[in-house]
Image: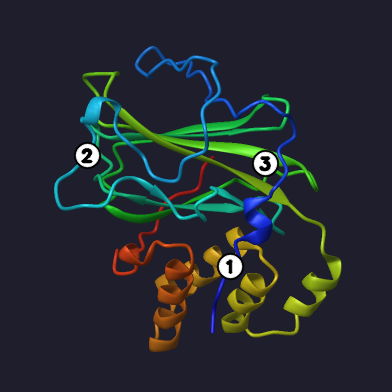
Amino acid sequence: MLGFSLVASSTLARPAAEAPRLPRFAQASSPEFSDAGRPRRRQGGGSRGFCLIADKPPLTALVPDSSTGFTLAQSPSFWFYLPYDLTERHSVEFVLKDGQDNLVHRKTLAGNQTAAGIVNLRLPASVVLEMNQTYEWYLLVQCDAGNPERFVFVNGAIQRLERPELQQKLATLTLDAHADLYAAENLWYDALDSSATRLRDTPSNKVRKNWRTLLQSIGLGNLESQPILSCCVVE
């Protein structure tokens, strides 16, 4: 049965002593963040409360409460619960920065009519994480295209590990067993991606049970019934 230890992910080292920063967004229509440090957060609180939707959970990154985790993937996936339909009114901006606060990748998604639910933002193959380096990611949702002050965001960290012996072991296992091994090895981003992809593409009672157990292990069991949508490659 899937389970997830939060010990290693909660102690994921940051590359600098200062608190993580939110990026400045170049577009005039996007909100400007100061360079003051902000803590990582997996659930979004809307600016001045404008972005909350009645009877729906808030914008949520599917990560442990520390908002940190590990991966083996060169170009990993990030999973989020979006309580909004992605239309011209609601746009999404994803930002990835390295440990020196340099911009690695940024992409805006808007107006593609994706319904509310759990979405996967997958990095393109051209964006490759370096081994043992910590990256900060940010997801911002513009709640009202006509008012740049109405937005909500989540942010966190990811680190790619080098585990060749584990890669060899994965090659001998079935796809159903991958998520279990990732969870046992404390590779949160890979465990989640494997479990969510299986549930979306080949759902079964066993896969649903594993999905429920995985989300409950990080305190996000309230999202287990949310639909998993086919979206999006961050190109």
Viewer can see residue 50:
yes
**Image x and y of residue 143, in percent:** 26, 31
In front: label 1 or label 2:
2
Query: For mark 3, does the 10 Å Cα neighbourhood hold few (<14), some (14 to 19), or many (20 or more) residues?
Result: some
Q: Nearer the viewer, residue 219 or 55?
A: 219
Q: Nearer the viewer, residue 15 or 103?
A: 15
Identify residue for label 3: 127
Quarter where residue 202 is shown: bottom left
Q: Which mark is residue 52?
A: 2
Q: Are marks 1 and 2 in contact (CB under 8 Å)?
A: no
Q: Amino acid at mark 1?
A: Ala
Q: Residue at the location (75% across, 78% down)?
A: 171
Q: Nearer the viewer, residue 52 or 7?
A: 7
Query: For mark 2, does the 10 Å Cα neighbourhood hold few (<14), some (14 to 19), or many (20 or more) residues?
Result: many
Element type at marker 3? loop
Identify residue for label 1: 191
Q: Nearer the viewer, residue 90 or 191?
A: 191
Q: Residue at the location (45% across, 17% down)?
A: 33
